[in-house]
Image (cartoon, rainbow, N blue to C red):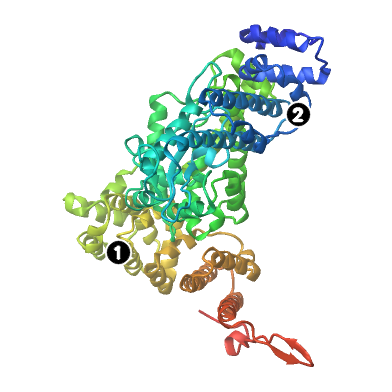
Amino acid sequence: MMKQDSSIHYLLQEDQYHWNQLNIHLQSENNHFSDDFLTKVKQLAISSSYALIQLCRYPSALKLLQSTTQFDLDERKILAAIEPIDDLDQIRSQLRQIRHRKMIEIVYLDVTEKTPVKDTLTHLSTLAELLIRCALNASEKYLAAKHGQPVDQDGSPVNLNIIAMGKLGGRELNFSSDIDLICCYSSDGELRGFGQLSHQEYFNRVVRLFSQLLNDITEEGFVYRVDLRLRPWGESGPVTLSHAALEHYYQLHGREWEQYAMVKARVLTGSDEDRQAISAILQPFVYRKYHDYRVFEGLATLKDKIDQQAKSKNMQDNIKLGSGGIREIEFFVQAFQILKGGRNKQLQTSQIFQCFDVLEQQEIVARETIRELREAYVFLRQLENKFQMLADQQTHSCPDNEIAQSRIAHSMGYTDWANVYAQQCSHRESVNNHFRDLFRRDVESDEAAIFGDALTNENSEQQQLEFMRSAGLRDTDKISHRLSEFFVSKAWSFMSARAKQRFSALMPGLIRAVGQSNQQLTLFERLLRLFSSIAGRSVYFELLHQNSQLLEKLVDLFDKSEWIAQEVTRYPMLLELLIQAGHPEERFKKARLQQSLQLQLDNISGDAELELDVLRLFKREQTIVIAMAEMSEQIDTTEVSLYLSELAELLLQAVYDLATKAAENQFGLPACEEYGKKTTPELAIIGYGKLGGQEMHY
């Protein structure tokens, strides 16, 4: 018999009826449960009213739970059990029973075996994928019997491709979550069965039917709430599209928020050819060839909308959408995926835990930042699941009910709710600090307004002169004249309103920095030439605005080197190199550079033109980085010669390897005989002069 105590009476006072019912089963003469298991059942009941109710409905699950130590999902057995069923109502019932029984198991393992949150999210996602496939198979079987099966021009079957989005796409599904899906198929055509439906009409019916099988609320509850609104054109668009229509949409009409959403996209159903085709459509839309800093501008706009929604709905205690919540962590990571994923395939993953690892291992983001974000994400996702386990409700907000608070604290392993709440506040403050650092979106000051378009403010030029004098500029008339010329130049007319706004915000700090130079007019003219070259690309103004240290370093380098100024003006993508930090001995290690170059080459393997572009850009980038290190006196002249020589050797080796591979693919390996043995001759490259003596210069 289960021992009763005052704490469980308090915690389960709202579920007393079901707790008493469960005790009847536990105390049955036919059941022999260990004291350890009975303690675990009590923990489960405190953590989840939903699991308690389902155990009363399916008491046979108790004996299975007693021997459960890890999640077991026999997919073949479940699919085979549902396949012969023709009655849709019976299928609905089976799907709900499977879901409830396996969810009880997931709660039990999470609460009593302390399953890592990453594994719990994976278990929830795996179960959802299986039930989606069960519902899809049943729907296709039902409709194919009436209308026939869709085939392409070659007679090959045309499959429905279900693309999982959001948490399911990342294999990080919540306990009680909607499942966001987009549905498509390979090619248009017409069925030969009853009604002669088009492929689109047929698949629309399939999607509606399997959605109903999962969505419908019966006396046994529901399976999943299916959300199809992320599809092209949203609710006003067709339920399914062909691959061609999907590609047309994302090429011409894809929006910024959809680019973020597609980071999580993962194809659940269809052939390998279907998966490859969908990847070829989505990859160019999400991951651009070059770094696009507009990602931060788009993210800022998207986050502003969410913040406004959160404020209007009083979401301070919402651990998903509120300040420093789960969404900010996801946006932080996705920003770097979109920014750098086009040139780094390891970032092209829908799983956030994998992305944490890549960002940390490749030092794209500071290790301490990633550590704090990962810890916060694990804690907040664990807490979110505990919220939802309680009653199988899709909630993300801290409860205001004292009993619910105590139950959640108990399931999290804390003595009281105050400690849980304090911990989530601490994590969210840390997350929000890191998130805000991505933008540095300070309100524009009165000083910034001085450097707006002079044509719209008759007092602007005089105000600029006064500011310049106060900043220590000597050639104020000439510098003001250059600025006025810039305001009426073609470059200024090409700039977007956002870029002009950012330019105005940059100017006060830039003027002050120029005031520290001994060649103020020359430096200012170099900077204006850069601004003219990036006028049509607001992404760079966004980058400079977000990084005050970057602007300071830019001014310093332009002041010290006309060559660097010319290179950066000609190739603005080099701007991001100014952000790089780290000790020179580590940064310029030949093995590390070789690994970095090889990673870039692997990302575009097989395309000779792109491979050469990578080599050219790599050489230019590393030369600039070495020059910056020398100018900041981090390395001396001898080290400069060594690093430039090693860079040349590394590039020679890379070109040799690419040329050898190309020749081998076309002609095969050369062979010769040496001392009676067949061997493959190798080519030696011997460096002379400056390269041979490792004395190269710029």
Q: Which amino acid type is marked by label 1?
A: Ser
In terms of depth relative to the viewer, which is nearer, 462 or 75? Answer: 75
- The image quarter in which residue 128 lies: top right
- Residue furthest bottom as drawn: 675
Of callouts 2 and 1, the N-terminal one: 2
Residue occupying image coordinates x 61% and y 37%: 126
Tell me the crowding category of disc 2: few under 14, some 14 to 19, or many 20 or more residues within 10 angstroms, Cα based. Answer: some
- The image quarter in which residue 53 lies: top right
Residue occupying image coordinates x 47% and y 36%: 145
* Residue 383 screen position, x and y as percent: 60, 28
- Residue furthest front as drawn: 193
Q: SS of the residue at dot 2?
A: loop
Residue with the mark numbered 1: 532
In terms of depth relative to the viewer, which is nearer, 580 or 317? Answer: 317
Q: Which amino acid type is marked by label 2?
A: Thr
Of tags 2 and 1, the one toward the viewer is 2
Which quarter of the rendered picture does the N terminus lie within?
A: top right
In terms of depth relative to the viewer, which is nearer, 101 or 348? Answer: 101
In the displayed structure image, the side of residue 514 where residue 418 appears, left or right: right
Q: SS of the residue at dot 1?
A: helix
* Residue 144 screen position, x and y as percent: 46, 38
Residue occupying image coordinates x 68% and y 36%: 74
Q: How far is disc 2 from disc 1 in space, using C-alphas?
A: 67 Å
* Residue 430 screen position, x and y as percent: 55, 37
In terms of depth relative to the viewer, which is nearer, 162 or 565? Answer: 162
Residue with the mark numbered 2: 68
In the displayed structure image, the side of residue 549 where residue 256 appears, left or right: left
Residue occupying image coordinates x 19% and y 60%: 488
In the displayed structure image, the side of residue 29 where residue 109 appears, left or right: left
* Residue 378 screen position, x and y as percent: 62, 36
The image shows residue 1, relative to residue 447, as above or below, that is above
